[in-house]
């Protein structure tokens, strides 16, 4: 038989009662001055935070109902009372440190899968889905594609050499003043006009185009988009600000391995088209130097060199998202077969037509107001 | 009958750093290893501790919210607001990419209006949630209003406030404060609030001084680093290191200055807002002056900087303690008449937006 003094709120008004708790191992009643309540089951009690030194319990079906024990609780009563939750759920059962270790392993696994899974899943996404999504996103690019009769012909010739099987659905030159080229979702490649301007020969453009064709064939853009979406969901970072979509696409980063594979594909395609990779190597070297102020051996030069006007870090550049290294130049340089007769990627007339495409196209929309 | 006129005032806080530290550090640990998901349970644990160490008149407060309901609410927000926004964002940018800037802008504005509206609703429901989960003497608070009307008020009052060089912002804030509190209740009693704009308006005018102070500061910067300023060419012979230092100090200075003005205004705002709050026979007061706020602010900065950021986990404790120690209440409350609240408490994750739980005060 249990008989113990408690304090009590009934949850109906704010009065604090001082009843006696009478009960046994199954349940109890509260008996106060001229009133009686219950029976209550021990199993319905919930341990709440202590109020000072008082142990406090609530009732799971009666909001605001409380009993509190001042001072020591006799052992036979304590055995019937529930334990207080500390961290919640299973953490209390297995202990904080063990739970932390388990959770850390799960977290690492989730992040690992989040990074890797897109690469496993992307090949199984139907190509038509990706194409539709890409078209929905980009459309006609706001009329910013440059077209001239000769320019189109030159681009077609270059495309025919590098992508004879037609992996890309379209390759376009866009009137946007960035030294860049991107593989959009849906097998479309855009070369921005300044990249062609900065290139000194069609071979150099062919190297970059071959690389982007590699991304198209390996479905790297879809992989990167899925990875970004997945990580933002995992990390709860739905910031919703987004910036413009083109920035998001330019900001997609592929893994080092994907970039290397794209380089290898570019080399294969150039070899098949009998285009020399030496130009591309020189292009990488030249642009990296002007972008980062790096010297020949790839190490950073002294600060004074970087302050020079032309070496502004243009983060919209292809060479910012594709930083070169000694091994990358050498990959292209060493791929050139000594003494082999290579053919230029385009004839001088075609090259001129390609370079003049955006200037000569009177209808093309300017890049003014292009979303930043 | 219970009267607050007892030693130590109506409100008291007897928590300690030493008790709070294990909660704060284990919260941090578990939040990290769960990639942030534990933060809902962490918030709940902190609040349970802080509430349980807070005395009002003769007994402690009790926090009965759970991490699970916050988490479920978060998932619902993600599903009901997050997903559509993902698609909307997609649509806006697809339009922009096609050069249909006008349509994209309209869609973007529409999205902004929706976010603005739900921001107001969330503010209302955060306060409702906190009152609904706070028990004292076995009695809780709440509101019978769902906050959707408040969201409309929130939009138009803030818009009007921004007109005329933001001069009506204090009016908007005070009027929204009153509107929100007048719909809240504790037990059977409605809160009543009739805060006035006049007491906070003078402090608000300080914001208009800021541009002049910043201008003066920029002039000194220009003097140090050289350059053209207001048509006057300023040259300098200072070494670049000092020029950079002056720049950095000036930029930090501008932020601190704006922060201090905001602090001065906010201290007047809360004094007026809470000072105009009544519940049945009780009248509330908030007695922190600008000096107290300065101490809190620089204390926060010092704590965070000196601990290289780890002090961040103690800010919730500091702010709650600051809040409670400066709260005061006068008058009487009849315990027989303080009966249980009949306001609705949604069972499933506390409705949609309680989960956003933006600062209630
Ligand atoms: Zn690439």
Image (cartoon, helix red, strand yellow):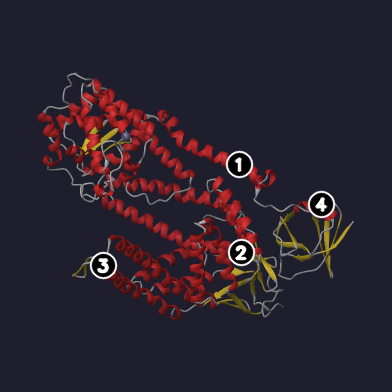
Q: Is mark 3 within 8 Å of ligand 1?
A: no
Q: Helix or strand or loop: what does disc 2 sit on?
A: loop
Q: Is the C-beta separation of discs 3 and 2 under 8 Å? A: no
Is B79 above or below relative to A31? above
- Gap in angstroms between the C-alphas marked 3 and 2: 60 Å
Residue topped by disc 2: B343
Residue topped by disc 4: A79
| Chain bearing mark 2 | B
Label 1 crowding class (10 Å Cα cut-off): few <14, some 14-19, many 20+? Answer: few
Q: Which of the marked residues, 4 or 1, is nearer the chain's N terminus?
A: 4
Asked where in the image residue A351 lies, by quadrant, the reply is top left
Camera-side mark, 4 or 1: 1
Identify the residue at horizontal 70%, vertical 65% (top origin).
Answer: B138
Q: Do marks 3 and 2 both belong to one polypeptide chain? A: yes
- Gap in angstroms between the C-alphas marked 2 and 4: 36 Å
Residue topped by disc 3: B222
Q: Position of residue A145 (x, y in %)?
A: 20, 39
Q: Which of the marked residues, 3 or 2, is nearer the chain's N terminus?
A: 3
- Gap in angstroms between the C-alphas marked 1 and 2: 42 Å
- Gap in angstroms between the C-alphas marked 4 and 1: 31 Å
Residue topped by disc 1: A101
Asked where in the image residue A34 lies, by quadrant, the reply is bottom right
**Does residue A338 show up?**
yes
Is A55 above or below relative to B198? above
Q: Position of residue A157 (x, y in %)?
A: 17, 26
Label 3 crowding class (10 Å Cα cut-off): few <14, some 14-19, many 20+? Answer: many
Q: Is residue B303 left or right of residue A61?
A: left
Q: Helix or strand or loop: what does disc 1 sit on?
A: helix
Residue A355 or residue B185, whichever sits in front = A355
| Quadrant occupied by the N terminus of chain A | bottom right
């Amino acid at each position: 038989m249990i008989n113990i003094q408690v304090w009590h709120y009934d949850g109906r008004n704010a009065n604090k009662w001082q009843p006696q708790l009478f009960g046994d191992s199954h349940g109890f009643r509260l008996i106060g001055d001229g009133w009686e309540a219950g029976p209550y089951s021990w199993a319905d009690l919930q341990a709440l935070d202590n109020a000072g030194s008082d142990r406090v319990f609530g009732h799971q079906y009666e909001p605001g109902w409380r009993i509190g024990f001042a001072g020591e609780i006799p052992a036979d009563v304590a055995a019937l009372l529930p334990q207080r939750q500390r961290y919640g759920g299973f953490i209390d059962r297995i202990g904080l440190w063990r739970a932390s270790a388990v959770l850390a392993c799960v977290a690492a696994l989730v992040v690992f899968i989040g990074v890797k899974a897109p690469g496993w899943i992307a090949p199984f996404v139907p190509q038509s889905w990706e194409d539709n999504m890409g078209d929905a996103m980009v459309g006609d690019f706001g009329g910013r594609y440059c077209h001239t009769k000769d320019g189109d012909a030159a681009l077609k010739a270059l495309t025919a050499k590098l992508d004879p099987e037609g992996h890309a659905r379209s390759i376009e030159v866009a009137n946007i003043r960035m030294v860049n080229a991107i593989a959009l979702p849906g097998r479309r490649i855009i070369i921005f006009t300044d990249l062609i301007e900065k290139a000194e020969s069609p071979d150099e453009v062919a190297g970059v185009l071959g690389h982007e064709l590699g991304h198209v064939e390996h479905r790297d853009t879809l992989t990167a988009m899925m990875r970004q979406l997945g990580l933002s969901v995992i990390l709860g970072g739905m910031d919703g600000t987004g910036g413009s979509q083109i920035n998001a696409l330019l900001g997609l980063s592929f893994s080092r391995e994907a970039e290397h594979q794209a380089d290898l594909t570019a080399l294969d395609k150039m070899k098949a088209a009998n285009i020399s990779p030496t130009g591309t190597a020189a292009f990488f070297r030249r642009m990296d130097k002007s972008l980062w102020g790096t010297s020949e051996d790839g190490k950073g030069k002294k600060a004074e060199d970087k302050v020079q006007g032309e070496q502004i870090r243009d983060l919209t550049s292809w060479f910012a998202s594709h930083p070169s290294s000694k091994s990358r130049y050498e990959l292209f340089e060493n791929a050139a077969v000594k003494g082999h007769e290579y053919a230029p990627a385009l004839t001088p007339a075609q090259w001129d037509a390609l370079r003049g495409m955006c200037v000569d196209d009177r209808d093309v929309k300017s890049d003014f107001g292009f979303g930043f | 009958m219970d009267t607050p006129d007892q030693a130590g005032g109506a409100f008291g806080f007897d928590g300690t750093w030493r008790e709070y530290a294990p909660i704060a550090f284990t919260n941090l640990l578990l939040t990290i290893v769960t990639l942030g998901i534990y933060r809902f349970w962490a918030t709940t644990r902190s609040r349970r501790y802080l509430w349980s160490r807070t005395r009002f008149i003769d007994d402690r407060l009790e926090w009965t919210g759970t991490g699970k309901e916050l988490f479920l609410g978060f998932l619902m927000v993600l599903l009901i607001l997050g997903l559509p926004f993902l698609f909307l964002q997609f649509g806006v940018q697809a339009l922009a990419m096609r050069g249909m800037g006008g349509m994209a802008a309209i869609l973007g504005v529409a999205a902004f209006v929706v976010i603005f509206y739900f921001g107001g609703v969330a503010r209302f429901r955060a306060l409702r949630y906190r009152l609904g989960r706070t028990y004292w003497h076995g009695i809780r608070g709440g509101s019978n209003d769902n906050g959707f009307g408040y969201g409309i008020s929130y939009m138009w009052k803030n818009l009007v406030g921004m007109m005329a060089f933001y001069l009506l912002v204090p009016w908007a804030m005070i009027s929204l404060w009153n509107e929100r509190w007048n719909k809240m209740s504790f037990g059977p009693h409605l809160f009543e609030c009739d805060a006035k704009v006049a007491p906070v308006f003078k402090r608000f005018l300080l914001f208009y001084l800021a541009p002049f102070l910043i201008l003066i500061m920029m002039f000194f910067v220009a003097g140090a680093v050289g350059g053209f300023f207001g048509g006057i060419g300023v040259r300098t012979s200072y070494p670049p290191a000092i020029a950079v230092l002056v720049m950095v100090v000036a930029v930090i200075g501008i932020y601190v200055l704006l922060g201090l003005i905001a602090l001065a205004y906010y201290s007047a705002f809360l004094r007026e807002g809470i000072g105009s709050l009544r519940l049945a026979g009780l009248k509330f007061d908030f007695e922190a002056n600008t000096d107290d706020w300065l101490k809190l602010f620089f204390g926060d900065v010092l704590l965070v900087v000196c601990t290289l950021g780890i002090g961040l986990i103690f800010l919730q404790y500091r702010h709650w303690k600051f809040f409670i120690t400066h709260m005061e209440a006068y008058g009487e409350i009849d315990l027989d008449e303080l009966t249980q609240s009949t306001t609705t408490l949604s069972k499933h994750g506390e409705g949609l937006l309680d989960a956003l739980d933006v600062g209630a005060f």
